[in-house]
């Protein structure tokens, strides 16, 4: 997993990892979630990957658009 840069300073995200068709996100509360091309869909996953790499905006996207539309809760 890679550390999320949190350039905005107030993110609830600690780390993320990506594959070709998915992204896993680890939140500060210990929740680990899988998002993939099935849920919430390729366009959303691609946007999440861009935001994860930039270190800004991923938490906002998840909380306002993606919400509970994840493929699996892993922990």
Image (cartoon, helix red, strand yellow):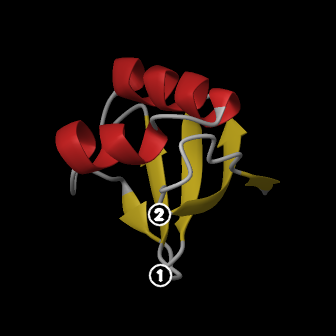
Label 1: how many Cα within 10 Å (few below 14, some 14–19, many 20+) = few
Locate residue 8 relative to residue 61 in the image: left or right. right
Residue at image coords 32%, 53%: 70
Label 2: how many Cα within 10 Å (few below 14, some 14–19, many 20+) = some
Camera-side residue of 28 and 18:
28
**Residue 74: percent from the left, percent from the top?**
50, 74
> From this viewpoint, which residue is outermost toward the right?
2
Whether residue 39 is visible: no
Question: Where is 15 relative to 54, above or below?
Answer: below
Q: What number is the disc on residue 29? A: 1
Q: What number is the disc on residue 12? A: 2
Residue at image coords 54%, 42%: 8
Whether residue 47 is visible: yes
Camera-side residue of 18 and 51:
51
**Residue 19: percent from the left, percent from the top?**
69, 37
* Alpha carbon distance from label 1 to label 2: 8 Å
Element at badge 2? loop
Q: What number is the disc on residue 49? A: none
Residue at image coords 48%, 31%: 48
**Residue 46: percent from the left, percent from the top?**
50, 21
Question: Where is 42 relative to 56, above or below?
Answer: above
> From this viewpoint, which residue is outermost toward the front?
9
Find residue 55 and report its image quarter: top right
**Residue 1: percent from the left, percent from the top?**
78, 57
Residue at image coords 56%, 52%: 9
Residues at marks 1 and 2 touching, judged by CB atoms closer than 8 Å = yes
Locate residue 38 relative to residue 5 in the image: left or right. left
Camera-side residue of 73 and 51:
51
Element at badge 1? loop
């Amino acid at each position: 997993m890679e550390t999320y840069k949190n350039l905005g300073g107030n993110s609830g995200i600690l780390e993320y990892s990506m594959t070709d068709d998915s992204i896993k996100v680890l939140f500060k509360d210990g929740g680990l979630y899988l998002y993939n091309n099935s849920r919430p869909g390729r366009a959303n996953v691609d946007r999440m990957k861009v935001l994860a790499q930039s270190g800004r905006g991923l938490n906002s996207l998840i909380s306002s658009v993606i919400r509970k539309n994840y493929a699996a809760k892993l922990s």
